[in-house]
Image (cartoon, rainbow, N blue to C red):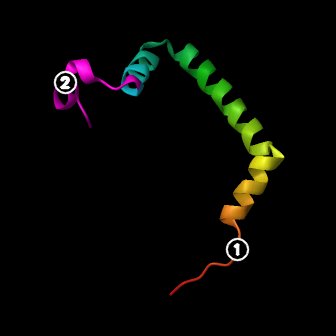
Amino acid sequence: MITEEDIGASETPESLIEIREFMKLPIEERRRILAEQAEQMVEHYEEESARRERELWQGGDIVEY
């Protein structure tokens, strides 16, 4: 795990700060945010263009050597 000591307190990455702030929220708020994100991902994966793209890189024969 990366600590502030490893990278210096002034160089804490924004993503780490966001994660810390998220974890400080009440559990109900975190669940609400995660539910919203899950809905967004459902919509993304149901889009035809995303489905086609996923099938292209996931499809095909498996070749073992």
| Picture residue at 49% right of the left edge, 12% below the top | 26
| Picture residue at 37% right of the left edge, 20% below the top | 17
Residue 15 placed where, x, y %? 41, 27
Q: Is residue 12 magenta?
A: yes
| Picture residue at 62% right of the left edge, 78% below the top | 62
Q: Is residue 13 left or right of residue 41?
A: left
Q: Amino acid at mark 1?
A: Gly
Mark 2 surroundings within 10 Å by alpha-carbon count, few (fewer than 14), some (14 through 19), many (20 or more): few
Q: CA distance from mark 2 to mark 1?
A: 47 Å
Q: Which residues are magenta?
A: 1-14
The numbered mark at residue 60 is 1
Q: Is residue 46 magenta?
A: no
Measured along the vertical axis of the image, is residue 63 above or below residue 11?
below
Image quarter in which the N terminus is found: top left
Q: Amino acid at mark 2?
A: Gly
Mark 1 surroundings within 10 Å by alpha-carbon count, few (fewer than 14), some (14 through 19), many (20 or more): few
The residue lying furthest to the bottom in this view is 65
For disc 2, the marked residue is 8
Residue 50 placed where, x, y %? 74, 48
Q: Is residue 9 left or right of residue 17?
A: left
Question: Where on the picture, by quarter, is residue 41?
Answer: top right
Residue 59 placed where, x, y %? 71, 68
Measured along the vertical axis of the image, is residue 21 above or below residue 34?
above
Q: Nearer the viewer, residue 29 or 54?
A: 54
Task: Label 1: state its secondary structure.
Answer: loop
The numbered mark at residue 41 is none
Task: Label 2: state its secondary structure.
Answer: loop
Q: Nearer the viewer, residue 58 or 42?
A: 58
| Picture residue at 66% right of the left edge, 32% below the top | 38
